[in-house]
Amino acid sequence: MKSDHPLESSANLAQESAEELYDSAPCGYISTLPDGTLVRVNQTFLRWLGYEREELLAGKRFQELLTGGGRLFHETHCVPLLQMQGAVNELSFDLVRKDGQRLPVLLNTVQKKDASGKTLFHRTTLFDISDRRNYERELVLARKKAEEATRAKADFLSMMSHEIRTPMNAIIGLSNLLARAPLPPLFQEYVRILQSSSENLLALLNNILDFNKMEAGQLMLEERRFELRPWLHGICSGMSVKAEQKKVSLRVEFGPGVPDSLMGDPVKLGQVLTNLLGNAIKFTEQGAVTLAVRVLQGDAKGVSLGFRVSDTGIGIAQDRLPQIFEAFTQASYDITWKYGGSGLGLAICQKLLALHGSKMSVESMPGEGSSFSFDVRLKIASGSVALDAPAEDLQDTQALQGLKVLVAEDNAVNVFVLSQFLRRWGVDFDVVENGRQAVEKVQERPYDLVLMDLQMPQMDGYEATRLLRSLPGEAPRPLPIIALTASSLLGAKEQGDAALFTDFIGKPFMPQELFTKLALHGARSRAVSQERGGEKRACQERSAPEAAAGGPRFDLEKFKSLAEGDRSAEIELNTLAIGTFEKQKQDLRKALEAGNVEAFDFHTHQLKMPLALMKPRVLLKALDQGRKLIEVPGRQASGIHDVIRTIHEELDAIVDALKEDVREKSGRALHAVGSCAAMWD
């Protein structure tokens, strides 16, 4: 009999509404047994897949509705995760519809258990993510198109920069040569305007190209060894001409304990300092510009250096300080009108420092000057010592006299400009038109340095440099090769080959930049070659008996080259190595006798750098044998003692050779002092 009770009718209505809500929900609902057998599905799920309810509830398992990869992922990831957590959320699967089409869904499943904890069934909610999948696909496609557009823009700018820089090289080079010629006053003014305009155009071009490279994400840090003091003095030497023109003093100050040899990216750091020094000189009418560097903190692995560029110039208003690091921003319109500039320099500096994990700060007062500072952490190069003596002046007019340079350049105008400056500085140079001729010339005659253009016929500068680096005798003291490049961007191939070059000079170059690079790399190479002339014969005499026994036991030349030809630094380096070897000799003995693998590995690691340079074949073999012996249980004591004896003999031989070298160099220095004293007497 049908009931007309109001409460019973309301309950039936609520049940019917819940069932309708379940069946017509915008998402799919299914219930499955623990093995995946479908026991309940809603109408939405059926409509998605095109099945009748009876087809799915006739023993079909949920896994059968998945793709092959989906089934594998369900068994290996979804099921174990569900058993551990009792639920899984936001898992993406592709369901296979009855017609074979795929439907991407997002799955959420929860276990339902009885009072005893036994799993009764799984309840799963599914969301159709077809629109989301299409949106993601469109995003990927849009990103790909954007990357292609960025790449096309970068390639276009690279090509255009090469085309623009080549004539700019001639304009700037010839205007500098004209400035040194005797001209009537009016023509001198014309030349001054030509120089100023071409330099401003070059600065603008460089800033735009650098900013574009950063926006394209094509700038990456490189790591190479550089000498801090000559590097900083070289940067200041390049800026000294502008400072002298304005009668502004330019100083470099080093704090105590600043290391000399570092590992880092001197090109990008140099770009930051050059920009800051250029701004400081530009905005200073009288007084001084100071570049100061000091140690903030350091350890055996690296050092944090603080750089500060201060001036006594016009200063910056306090309300403009937050905006000066923004692109295309100047402190005021009056500054732009009076001093020029694109407003990109400081923005580029900030981006370059961001690559180092650093940030620039500024302090300034109008009419009193400005101070820009930043700090970077750099690795200390192997064999580096802290020096407090000032570096030599790289702008000495006699620094390049007699320097032997090979110029590999196919552009006649560029050759003319280079030749004029090299002759003026007393450089002995030869010119070749392609990389193949450069390789042949280097084999015919010794050079202190090579200026290598990158784009030449027959053989380009990259391939020529690879061949030069593979020549016999290149390893102990690599020939300085400076790349001449008019391109603003390097492709993947070029970036991989960039480490072959000692340094880079962009075309068009400023005369002081060329002078500085030649003095920094070429003059030092010449000094080292001359220093080694007598030592090489002595070394050959000492190693003759060893060669008869199967080659020299070790070679000190590459190790001593860390001192860069500085006799006092070489004495200090040898003394440090002697103390290290004497200590490690005992430490290695204790580790071998105790069978302590960790201690043995630690002490051999301490010797890794000097041994890699000295290549002591007998010692390395003994260390390898000792490592194998202490790894084996029940090792023989006699074998350990034989290894210890060999290690001690080889380390003693190296120490004796280092001591002899120290005595020889110390005696030579004392002889030089005695000769000077005799002259004064």
Image (cartoon, rainbow, N blue to C red):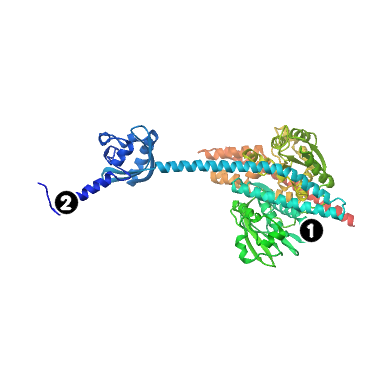
Label 2 SS: helix
- Closer to the camera, 636 or 561? 561
Query: Which residue is denoted by mark 2 in the rendering?
Result: 9
Q: Which mark is residue 220?
A: none
Label 1 SS: helix
Query: Which residue is denoted by mark 1 in the rendering?
Result: 245
Where residue 147 appears, as percent x and y from the top left, is 56, 42
Residue furthest out toward the left: 1
Residue ID at (54%, 45%): 598
Residue ID at (33%, 36%): 49
Q: Is residue 45 left or right of residue 305?
A: left
For label 2, count other residues whose C-alpha is less than 10 Å away and answer few (under 14), some (14-19) or many (20+): few
C-alpha span from label 2 to label 1: 102 Å
Residue ID at (83%, 44%): 420
Which residue type carries mark 1? Gln
Which residue type carries mark 2? Ser
